[in-house]
Amino acid sequence: MQPIQLPNHSFPTTSGEINLSQIDTPWLIIYFYPKDSTPGCTVQAVDFSGLNAQFADLNTQIIGVSRDSVKAHQNFTAKQNLSIELISDKEEVLCQLFDVIKEKNMYGKKVFGIERSTFIFHQGKLVKEYRKVKAAEHAEQVLADLKALQNTAA
């Protein structure tokens, strides 16, 4: 795992600006997903939202990131009743930093898009990463892994 430094930079979210280097919880989960309101991305966002209270009990904040606009994020959040923050990374600052833009094959055409990926940070330090994530049951796996990480960190 290469060290990824959380940038001291403000990003637009569904509820204002957020600076990842100034998150006040000891644990942070950042997950990247391709597009709002698509089947897999909806499953993942709804699952993380459904478990958000359990993550909060573990002093953990969850933030989703895609290249969608803030307006698209707000519509997605309202439609799915999401309880997590979503960052709009239209300039791909975070996508490049986390190296999640990959070549994909869409209906026979090569395109570049976000590879579904998740990262767990403890006090600003990357402690676990997931690449090529399958949306179904991923949030539950992250929660279980987080509990295990917290037990070893204690």
Image (tube, grey):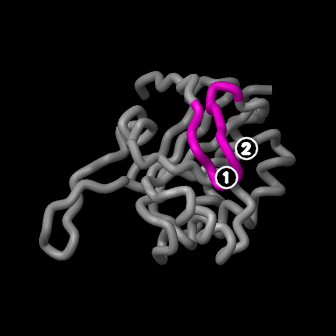
| Disc 1, SS | strand
Report the mark closest to the observer, 1 or 2: 1
Residue that carries the numbered disc 2 in the rendered image: 61
Callouts 1 and 2 close, C-beta under 8 Å: yes
Residue at horizontal 47%, vertical 54%? 66
The quarter holding residue 140 reads bottom right
Say if 121 sits above or below 61 in the image: above
The chief SS type of the magenta part is strand
Q: Amino acid at mark 1?
A: Glu
Is 71 left or right of 114, judged from the image as shown? right
Say if 71 sits above or below 58 in the image: below
Local crowd size for mark 2, using a 10 Å CA cut-off: few (<14), some (14–19), many (≥20): many
Residue 34 x %, y % = 41, 60
Residue at horizontal 55%, vertical 72%? 42
Task: Report the magenta residues as a range.
Answer: 10-22
Tell me the tag on residue 85: 1
